Image: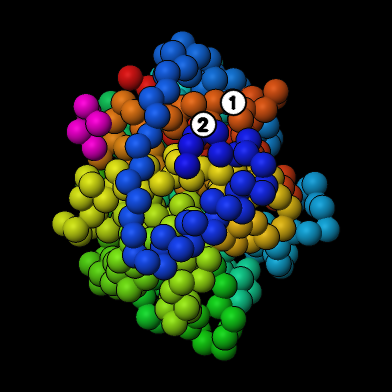
Amino acid sequence: ETATMPRLPYALLGLILCTSVIADDLGVERPIRLPKVEFPTQKAVLDSIDRGCAFLRNRQNPDGSWGSARNTKGLNIYAPVPGSHRAFRLAVTALSTAALIENKGNDSNFSKVIGNGEEYLLEKLSYLRRATPMAIYNVWAHAYGIQALARMHQRIVGKSDANKTKLLRIEDLIRHQFGMLERYASIDGGWGYYDFNAQTKQPSGSSISFVNATCLVALHEAKERGIEPPEKLVKRAYDATQRQRLPDHSYLYGEYLKWKPRRGINRPGGSLGRSHACNLALQLWGDKTVTEDVHKICLDRLIARNGWLSVARKRPVPHESWFAVAGYFFYYGHYYASFCIKTLPEADQTLYQNHLAAILMPLQEKDGSWWDYPFYDYHQQYGTAMALMSLKRCLR
């Protein structure tokens, strides 16, 4: 297991896969000793961030949003129009706005871009609903919308009385998103993005571990801004995520797989992209068993076994790679890993920051973007936003 695994031949990858499966079945956690890597330098990371932010500025739509239904490839996921694309566009706009606030919130060259993104969210989020009884992609936009709104709130709070009206508008919209998450929560708690039953007013399908985590992290960010989410909503999602937690610190893809916990997608290699989000969510909401050591175990796995995510990156068919990993887990997994790094003592952060920056920076495209899965015209925008917020947490 090395940080250069993506460059190893497939035959050797297969051998590593076999030994990994045997170790998992025996319940053995092999010690991982990460090699030291040099930090790419503060200037290099800042230059990379500048290029990524410039990409987002150049790709913003005239109405202030990011992304569109263009660039179809004949392999896109089930996405009934128009509701699915309203959800995708709002989720991507929320991520892009959040990334620019974090990295360019005080840069006058980005004031108009950020302002237009904020206004789009304030105008459109309250109208978002599920596309069909089966397609519940809107939960992503509600969650990332809350995260963007929390950053918007933090950006203007206490600055002047002139912002009071906007501040109240943001707070009201965050509470409205709480209501939407209540409406579209599974009857067993938590959230999924499909309901294959599609015969009930409230979704009756399985909750999905990383969707729960995404929403729980967003709800906690709202709480930190003094806007308390409904206690019952949080508790039910928390419990649903706990039910999907495995003893080896992996998480089921979804609760529907509880009787098949050793399927590849549920093993450590298949959980690389979601363990960090789930660990973070449980820790934020009070789980004392998610310790520094647990974060380190999962971060070590992410770096040492990064090949399992890298092999899936840019593949056009979901879940076709090893351990049934889908390409769209790549930047998602590193995004939440960067949050987990920041929960560690400062002395322990450096090693992981170095590795994370060393993984992400070489993957930046010539146009300044990052992307991991061809997805209409949303992939470069969400990949770039997640990479930017990850690199932000790598800065000294």
Q: Is residue 341 left or right of residue 9?
A: left
Kindly report the secondary structure that dominates the magenta region of the rendered protein: helix
Nearer to me, 352 or 2:
2
The amino acid type found where label 1 is placed reads Pro
Q: Is residue 291 left or right of residue 311?
A: left
Nearer to me, 98 or 43:
43
Q: Is residue 245 visible?
A: no
| SS at circle 2 | helix
Can you identify the residue that label 2 sits on?
Answer: 359
Residue occupying image coordinates x 25% and y 40%? 343
Residue occupying image coordinates x 36% and y 42%? 32
Q: Which mark is residue 306?
A: none
Residue occupying image coordinates x 44% and y 39%? 303
Q: CA distance from mark 2 to mark 1?
A: 7 Å
The amino acid type found where label 2 is placed reads Ile
Residue 55 vertical position relative to residue 217 in the rendered view, above or below: above
Residue 104 vertical position relative to residue 84 in the rendered view, above or below: above
Magenta segment range? 344-348
Is residue 162 highlighted in magenta? Answer: no
Can you identify the residue that label 1 sits on?
Answer: 362
Near mark 1 (Cα within 10 A), the count class, few <14, some 14-19 or many ≥20, is few
Percent coordinates x, y for residue 186 in the rendering: 43, 77
Percent coordinates x, y for residue 229 in the rendering: 28, 60
Q: Is residue 224 visible?
A: yes
Nearer to me, 238 or 147:
238
Percent coordinates x, y for residue 42 in the rendering: 42, 14
| SS at circle 1 | helix
Q: State if disc 1 and disc 2 touch (CB < 8 Å).
A: yes
Q: Is residue 46 left or right of residue 10?
A: left
Near mark 2 (Cα within 10 A), the count class, few <14, some 14-19 or many ≥20, is some
